Image: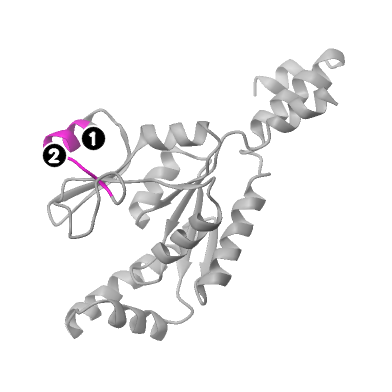
Amino acid sequence: MSTEKTYFDKIAEYGQLIVISGPNGVGKNTVIRQYLSEHPIACRSISVTTREPRPGEEDGKDYFFISVTEFDQLVRSQALLEHVYIDNNGYGTPRKAVEENRKEGRNVILNVDVMGAMKIRALCPDATLIFMVPPSWAELERRVRASTSLTDQEIKEYLECAEEDILCASQYDYVLINDEVDKTVRRMGQIIHGNRYSRNNMKSFLESYIQGELKPHSEFADAILSM
């Protein structure tokens, strides 16, 4: 029994990295907030930024607000999994915090754009990429108009960017249709739970199992473990 427990302690002992992308206005933050409220073992990665805090934002909760010099140092030292500049302000995902949370067995949720997601995939091949789409184009436009005070021209440009994003959805592992928040959160949970038993997330379990069960009587175990 103790041997079995040792093996099963290895299942998902290293947290997953879940990367969420989608057009602005599709509801990513709403879905992520609800998922985190229902799954306290998971956590949201907090980005660093060089912009000034907006009213109501808290340092260490919404963002880590840092200087341009500090941001440049993080970029040069490759301490960011991804980074981008928007309106002359830097935004990035700290590598250390993500890795520490994953080592503690916590699933880390990132909300990044398509370019950031592709950068993370290159650095973290075991990351799971989820793209969120609206149930219809008309619904996306309705949500954008309801949540912003943009002009018609600005909304047009907004939607053009959304179109470019959606055309990249095929590069992701999963696509979620955010028709109703509760349903989307449930589907997202199913993806993450099922992914717990993927090859990447079961690696430590397999190594422990091969070491204990196969190595004592298999001449091929060492070769398998070294692969």
Q: Residue at x 66, y 40 (%)?
A: 199
Whichever of callouts 2 and 1 sits on the residue coming sooner in the sequence is 2
Observer able to see residue 84: yes
Which mark is nearer the camera, 2 or 1? Answer: 2
- Residue 201 drawn in magenta: no
Q: In which quadrant is the C terminus drawn?
A: top right
Question: Residue 189 is drawn in which quadrant?
Answer: bottom right
Closest to the observer, 138 or 14:
14
Q: Quadrant of residue 1?
A: top right
Q: Relative to 170, say whether 46 is above or below.
A: above
- The mark total stands at 2
In this picture, residue 213 sits left or right of residue 30: right
- Identify residue type, mark 2: Ser
Report the residue marked by disc 2. Answer: 67
Q: Please report the residue visible at 20 percent of the width from the left and 85 percent of the height from the top.
A: 152
Pick the residue in front: 1 or 56.
Answer: 56
Where residue 57 appears, as percent x and y from the top left, is: 24, 55
Nearer to me, 123 or 193 = 193
Residue 29 percent across, percent down from the top left: 39, 62
Q: Is residue 17 left or right of residue 137?
A: right
On residue 210, the disc is none
Give me the C-alpha separation between circle 2 and circle 1: 13 Å
Q: Residue 17 placed where, x, y %?
A: 49, 44
Residue 169 vertical position relative to residue 222 in the rendered view, above or below? below
Question: Is disc 1 surrounded by few (<14), some (14 to 19) or many (20+) residues within 10 Å?
Answer: some
Residue under pointer 1: 75
**Magenta segment boundaries in residue numbering:** 63-73
Quarter of image, res 149: bottom left
Residue 2 place in picture, x, y as percent: 81, 23
Amino acid of disc 1: Val
Above or below — where is 225 with respect to 82? above
